[in-house]
Image (cartoon, helix red, strand yellow):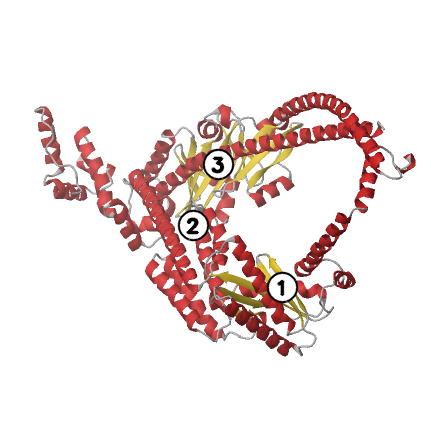
Amino acid sequence: MRTVFVRLLLHLTVAVVLITLLVGALVYRYTTVMLKEEVLGANTELLAQTRKIVEQALGEVQQMATSLAINTDVQKSVWLPWNLEEEYRFLQNTGNLFSERIHSSNYLHSIYLYSSVNNKLISPSGIMDLTDFPNREPLREFIEGRETMSWGAGRWPDERNSSDSVLRFYFSVPLNHMEKKGVLLIHLKEDVLYNAVVNTNNRKLGNVAILNSEGEVLSYKDKSMLLHPFADTDIEQIRTEKTGSFVEKIGGKPTLVSYLTSDFNGWIYVTLNPYQEVFKRSNDIIRITLLISLLGLALGVALMVLVSRNYYKPVRRMVHALSNHLERPFTKALHRDEFSYISESIDHLFNENEEFKTKFYNSELVLREHALIHLLSGSPSGSEELKRQLAYYGIPLQPEHFIVIVLRLYLDEEPEEKLRNLIHFQVRMLCEETMAAYGSGVYIPQFHKQDVMIMNTGTWGDREQTVNKAKELAFQVKRNVTTQLPEASLTIGIGGSYRSLGEICLSYNEAVEVLLYERFTGTGSILSIHDLHINYMNRNRFMNFRQWVDKAVNELKIGRLDASLAAKDELIRQLVGDSALGLHHKNLILNGLLHALMTVRAEMLTGREGEEEDDGLVYEFAKLQSLEDIRLWFDKVFARTADALQDKREYKNVELIGKLVSHIQANFREPLSLQMLADLTYMNSQYLSKLFKEVTGQTFMDYLTYIRLQEAYRLLKESSLGINEIAAASGFGQKQNLIRTIKKHTGLTPTEYRKRYAIERLNGEKSKIDTDPIH
């Protein structure tokens, strides 16, 4: 009799071992995934930061190229044939301009200007023919191509007969000309740029590499690790997914590669982490987990041995007690151990008990209800099995021709539980009495909180007669219930007529579906799935409703909330007043309005806070019970959307004007105009002028004049430059422009202004001259 305890002990031991291994495996997997996600998250943030820094540096180079391209001397060098004897000055100015820009930056290597008219290049070191230019092949490819600007990388020979790694930037002059008359070629020192911009913090950014779109290395701290580009499959994955990670063998060691592709110029930013070091911590954790689990296993086995000994004696006493109550005890051959003996003894005693028979009968009733529920739920049983269940449980249904009617009960006040149960019972009795007059059928109470009637329709006639008969039955049920129970009301949904038992679930689903349209007809109505397909919408009528939907959405987009709400209200008003329009089409039109609104939110509010609320709009809409609820709900959603659109519109305007102000402050010495800024931002100049005034409080010309005057005042005070030189250095160009502007704002000429400032300074007085040109 001890065998069962031995087997139980072995089974529990095996179970504990398996659970220990499973827990260890799950902990290891979870730790590995968590560490990988942590590393990938840190790498993604690192790559995004690096890309932003690099693109900012490259953007500065592009801005510098733009300012160089509009320089007068550069334009002359591109468009005019060079006569070195007569027009040497503007060529010399161009070379000096390039030299100044190179000396002002640590990572500029060289600047060249190519003129297709002269087939020569200008640089700070002089003029050279295209045939003598080291990188003439890439230059020819750019000239023959369609791009107006391009980034690349290569080598540049130095004075030591070696070569430097450089990044090349080609810029067409003029930028928007179909035929490239000239090209600005700017070389950046790759190693200086990497150390100064990318690798500013070697501990964090030291493993970031920059590749071109083909996978070739542009910048990295140790290019010997990446002598060969990544496999074609890896590069294709990078192009397709833009951001992600994969494991690649580099230097014979598995390396976790995280990547991010730039939309600015197609460059690829990658980080390299040794795979084994990344997941070293997960191996330590699994060892600790297994050690703790083994200790727990040993303790568990000891406890199981102790418990099994303590419980052995009570079980043996139970066996003796059962043997004494049996008239003929079982022989030892009938049982394998003490538990099988106890089980067989209890079964024997239980089968002789009259109480068991009563419980079995109640179980049959429960199983009968389950059989009906399976019919409504769509049981996978075959037709013959369903017929057998109908016969076995005595369900009064014929095996063919059915229709399902669903009842939704409403009470004026929520009663106590006992009274509510009594009302449901009365409703059931009234329904079963009414059903008996129309043929065979069954009533299923509270299936998914709704009562269901399944009726046989074999004697009701053809399809149209069946539908009319079902409506008549529903009307009688509703009248009987509301007459006997004035505090109750019924909304009734009628499904379609089907032939076989397996299709009862289809009729039930249709009846539930049609109850969704109660929002249009109100509580206490009778709805049939057949009615949804009777009314066909005229195309012109549908287009009219569609126009109101489009008008409501378009007015919302442009910020006219009142007009948008008015269009929405007119749409709902026409839906209510159109009696010829089917319920299905009314629901379709309102869903179309909801989807159009969600499309606007998805397209125009991407990346905003609270974006997750869109996920619940469809669910909220489905819960609305009436057209008035729908109208009020749309009012709230339209208002929230309008506020979010206005916030985003204002934020984008401030950000745009801020960038233009920075551009003006950096380039006020160059010729600037409102149209030039409009071209840069692809906007209408009049709209940009209005937007600039709204954000800054000043017109574009007032602000530009203010910046230039500030520089002119500073030069008049702090330098001994002449008026012509100050006019050129402050962006006024001509001497007369400077004199006229200063006199307009101070009443003094530049010379008078300088003298008065000098006198006040000698006398130790605070300057009384108003130098603020904008009042």
Tag of residue 465: none
Q: Secondary structure at mark 3?
A: helix
- The crowd level at tag 2 (other Cα within 10 Å; few <14, some 14-19, many 20+) is some
Q: Nearer the viewer, residue 79 or 205?
A: 205
Contact between labelled residues 3 and 2, with CB atoms less than 8 Å apart: no
Residue at 40 percent of width and 28 percent of height: 106
Q: Residue 127, how many percent across, how many down?
A: 41, 36
Q: Is residue 83 above or below residue 574?
A: above
Which of discs 2 and 3 lies nearer the camera? The answer is 2
Report whether 32 appears left or right of 588.
right
Residue at 54 percent of width and 62 percent of height: 408
Amino acid tagged 2: Leu
Q: Is residue 249 visible?
A: no
Q: Earlier in the sequence, mark 2 or mark 1?
A: 1
Q: Which residue is mark 2?
A: 605
Please identify the quadrant where the N terminus is shown: top right
Q: Which residue is mark 1?
A: 508
Q: Residue 288, how many percent across, how many down?
A: 65, 22
Q: Earlier in the sequence, mark 1 or mark 3?
A: 3
Amino acid tagged 3: Ala
Amino acid tagged 1: Tyr
Q: Nearer the viewer, residue 299 or 693?
A: 299
Calculate the distance from the C-alpha at mark 1 to the C-alpha at mark 3: 54 Å
Q: Which residue is mark 3?
A: 48
Q: Residue 562, how many percent across, how many down?
A: 33, 60
Please identify the quadrant where the C terminus is shown: top left
Q: Earlier in the sequence, mark 2 or mark 3?
A: 3
Residue at 66 percent of width and 77 percent of height: 460
Q: Is residue 559 visible?
A: yes
- Quadrant assignment, res 317: top right
Residue at 71 percent of width and 29 percent of height: 21
